Image: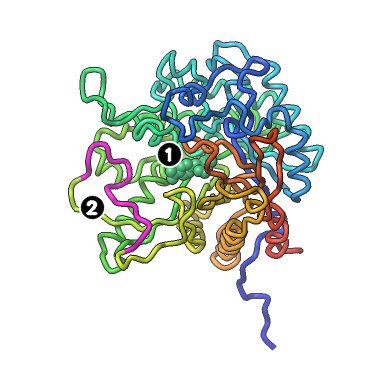
Amino acid sequence: ILSTTSMPEASLPKDFLWGFATASYQIEGAVHADGRLDSIWDTFCRIPGKIADGSSGEVACDSYNRTGEDIALLKELGAKAYRFSLSWSRIIPLGGRNDPVNQPGLDFYVKFVDDLLAADIVPMVTLFHWDLPDALDKRYGGLLNKEEFTEDFVHYARTVFEAMGGRVKHWITLNEPWCSAVLGYNIGVFAPGRTSDRSKSAEGDSSRECWIAGHNMLLAHAGAVKVYREEFKERDGGEIGITLNGDWNEPWDASDPADIEACERRLEFIIGWFADPIYFGHYPASMKQQLGDRLPDFTPEEAELIKGTNDFYGMNHYCTNYIRHRSDPADANDFGGNVDVLQENKAGEAIGPPTQAPWLRPYAQGFRKLLKWISDRYGRPKIYVTENGTCILGENDKSRDEILEDEFRVWYFRTYVQAMAEAVGVDGVDVRGYLAWSLLDNFEWADGYETRFGVTYVDYEGGQKRYPKKSAKVMGEIFGELIKKD
Ligand code: PNW
């Protein structure tokens, strides 16, 4: 008889925290309620042409007025945890360390957390999911101003820890700083909409901005972690980390060493940019080599401040791409490691089926491989998958009844969660939680409301009423099969 006790198999640990994720500007609406002022996303949405359907987060899912409904939904779906973000503009509407705290804004989140806890749902709180108070952008250039931005962020973080530290045990400082930096300061498709190709003059070299923004976000993250550890950790007993986006890469030509190398370099440019300073205290060599002095340096004190600031690794992951190296030297505006990102390989084979987002092609084994890559490179950190999910090609053109039968999303979650359980049970990666993106269809940034990522349909014409899709209902079953009983 074969003993199965030592045979590795796909499984997830007993206390595994699974649930759903959202972000403030994408769901809350009520943008001027109870003292909230504009964030950079409110102002960005008013610029004609920036949002595909001309919309904004002004109403969104109206979650600010429907917290009871959202918590009941989470409960109904069996979620153990909920990841959401705080709107800095509700808590300190003008944003700065000398600006007033808006008590109703803070109270809203304290009550929300209490309600989640009463429903036995673990809150995972993101401090910053891209919605910077607009006043800080106007006052001193927002993320580009190292001293001002880092001090203001740390003050905001302390204000929040003070108010609800005892209730929250899982803190995420920043969501996907790569997106804030590259999409906001290089390509300009996200707020504040600055591009890298504006100037090389006395007023500055705009191709440096995204690297400066990234650098300053790392320092802001580190500053908040220091405050948490020194002033709150003992009292509150929680943990704190950053959430980074990262997709897996397969070589466009698997027989070309230059494409294989390009895959690794791309991972360093997306993930290593932030994770290397946090785990090693410096930027990846490949980035220094390509960017030269466009990449800021850390002073020895800064490097020391940043190193070791993750209690866990927050991982957002959606898809895999094919990567082809470029033979020409990198352009000054390049942010991706001088590669082409493709959805088909040299033989013309697609990595996965198309979705509503041109960049998103599902390939579940890529998730398993990236989990292992992160685990190996950073010394087997504790990982929370803080986002994973998909949109569906043409979903928004279908009737509500058809949208509710989202078999494609069910397939995505089944295969991705299975791949994660293989990474845990077979490869030994330490994953402790998984938050599906997203609880609700919501404001998908530059794509507006045309792209739906929710496991719950939101009827924007019908008073924001929520209808759980099939994918919402199968999640409990998927995790039930993989989480160990004892
Ligand atoms: C993440 N890309 O953003 C965000 O954290 C969510 O707020 C967002 O709704 C979700 O993914 C779905 O898009 C990304 O261009 C935005 O590669 C863009 C990219 C990746 C992630």
Q: Is residue 410 left or right of residue 342?
A: right
* SS of the residue under disc 1: helix
Q: Is residue 337 above or below residue 159?
A: below
Badge 2: few (under 14), some or many (20 or more) residues near its Cα, within 10 Å?
some
Tell me the CA gap for discs 2 and 1.
22 Å
**The C terminus lies in quadrant:** bottom right
Which image quadrant is residue 158 in?
Answer: top right
- Residue corresponding to mark 1: 178
Q: Is residue 215 above or below residue 256?
A: above
Q: Amino acid at mark 1?
A: Trp
Q: Quadrant of residue 460?
A: top right
Front-lying residue, 439 or 151: 439
Q: Are marks 2 and 1 in contact (CB under 8 Å)?
A: no
Tell me if residue 124 can be seen.
yes
Earlier sequence position, callout 2 versus callout 1: 1
Q: Which residue is mark 2?
A: 326
Over which residues does the magenta segment extend? 330-345
Is residue 207 magenta-colored? no
When the figure is inspected, residue 121 is found, relative to residue 105, above or below; the finding is below
Q: Is residue 275 visible?
A: no
Q: Residue at x 39, y 28 (%)?
A: 193
Residue occupying the far bottom of the picture: 1
Q: Position of residue 439 (x, y in %)?
A: 65, 44
User: In the image, is 332 to the left or to the right of 479?
Assistant: left
On the image, the x and y values in percent for residue 311 come to 57, 43
Residue 134, above or below 404: above
